[in-house]
């Protein structure tokens, strides 16, 4: 198979929707190891 720009464009058109859908359906695991801290501003300084 010859790999050129048009072949790569076609491949990425197929991969992007599959990746995006899988990413949306994947479960999130961050709650097991991290916590959400509310913020009142854009920047925070932790002491």
Image: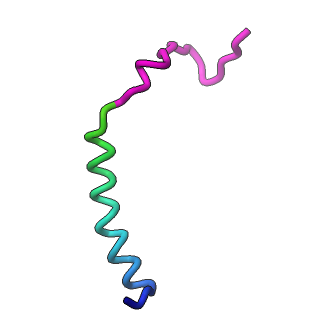
Please state if 13 lies on the left or on the right of 4 as rendered. Answer: left
Please state if 30 lies on the left or on the right of 14 as rendered. Answer: right
- Residue 45: quarter of image: top right
User: What residue is rendered at 29% in x and 67% in y?
Assistant: 14
Residue 4 in the image, given as x and y percentages of width and height: 45, 87
The overriding secondary structure of the stretch rendered in magenta is loop
User: What residue is rendered at 47% in x and 16% in y?
Assistant: 36
Query: Quadrant location of the C terminus?
Result: top right
* Residue 45 on the magenta span: yes
User: What residue is rendered at 41% in x and 19% in y?
Assistant: 31
Please state if 25 lies on the left or on the right of 5 as rendered. Answer: left
- Residue 26: quarter of image: top left
Query: Quadrant location of the N terminus?
Result: bottom left
User: Where are the magenta residues, as a range?
Assistant: 28-47
Up-down relation of residue 46 to residue 22 (above or below): above
| Color encoding of the figure | rainbow
* Residue 20 on the magenta span: no
Residue 29 in the image, given as x and y percentages of width and height: 39, 27
User: What residue is rendered at 54% in x and 15% in y?
Assistant: 39
Of residues 45 and 20, the one drawn nearer to the viewer in this rendering: 20
């Amino acid at each position: 198979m010859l790999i050129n720009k048009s072949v790569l464009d076609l491949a990425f058109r197929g991969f992007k929707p599959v990746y995006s859908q899988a990413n949306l359906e994947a479960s999130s695991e961050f709650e097991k190891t991290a916590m959400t801290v509310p913020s009142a501003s854009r920047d925070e300084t932790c002491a």
